[in-house]
Amino acid sequence: MSSRRRRSPARLILRRREQTRYPPWAFGFHLSMDEIIAAIPKLSSTPSVLEGEGHLHSLFLQYHDVFHHVEMQMALQSDAFGWKWATIDAEPCYVNGGQRTVLSLFKCTRPSKDFLPEDDKLDVMKKIMAEAGFTKEPAWYRVAAQ
């Protein structure tokens, strides 16, 4: 008779840099590069520099402005909902076999529908993302690095 190890129950990861035995899962919105670039004129206040070293620096600041804007909007809304468990952060995750940026609402040790927000609250989050120009549906993604 072989022994079978039982899987431990899924649990939320409540601290940003909490170490886990295996890479955690994140539930959130995939931020595609095309959508980030399209959002820069709308969400970034950093002026564009077209040449030299300043170009890369201004591009980095513009990306940062976009991430900061959507993170802040989502954090404010999650506070309004009373979500104490939300750890909103831009995470490198595996999307279609490659590493991409995902704005995660929360992380956990294993995907579980028990942790998903109610549909009406998730619709509010989708609306915030759509207003910023991000159209992907939220889903589970494996975090690429911790």
Image (cartoon, helix red, strand yellow):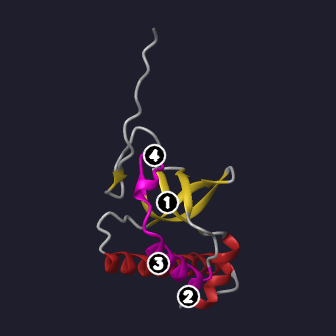
- What amino acid is found at the position of numbered circle 3 in the picture? His
- What amino acid is found at the position of numbered circle 4 in the picture? Arg
The residue to which callout 2 is attached is 43
Q: Residue 63 has which mark?
A: none
Q: Residue 27 has which mark?
A: 1
Element at badge 3? helix
Q: Is residue 78 magenta?
A: no
The disc, 2 or 3, on the residue closer to the chain's N-terminal end is 2
The disc, 4 or 3, on the residue closer to the chain's N-terminal end is 3
The disc, 2 or 4, on the residue closer to the chain's N-terminal end is 2
Q: Residue 110 has which mark?
A: 4
The picture places residue 4, in percent across and down from the top left corner, at 44, 20
Element at badge 2? helix
- What amino acid is found at the position of numbered circle 2 in the picture? Leu
Q: Is residue 131 shown above or below 63?
A: below
The disc, 1 or 4, on the residue closer to the chain's N-terminal end is 1
Q: Residues within 10 Å of mark 3 (few under 14, many from 20)?
A: some
Element at badge 4? loop
Q: Residues within 10 Å of mark 4 (few under 14, many from 20)?
A: some
Q: Is residue 32 shown above or below 130?
A: above
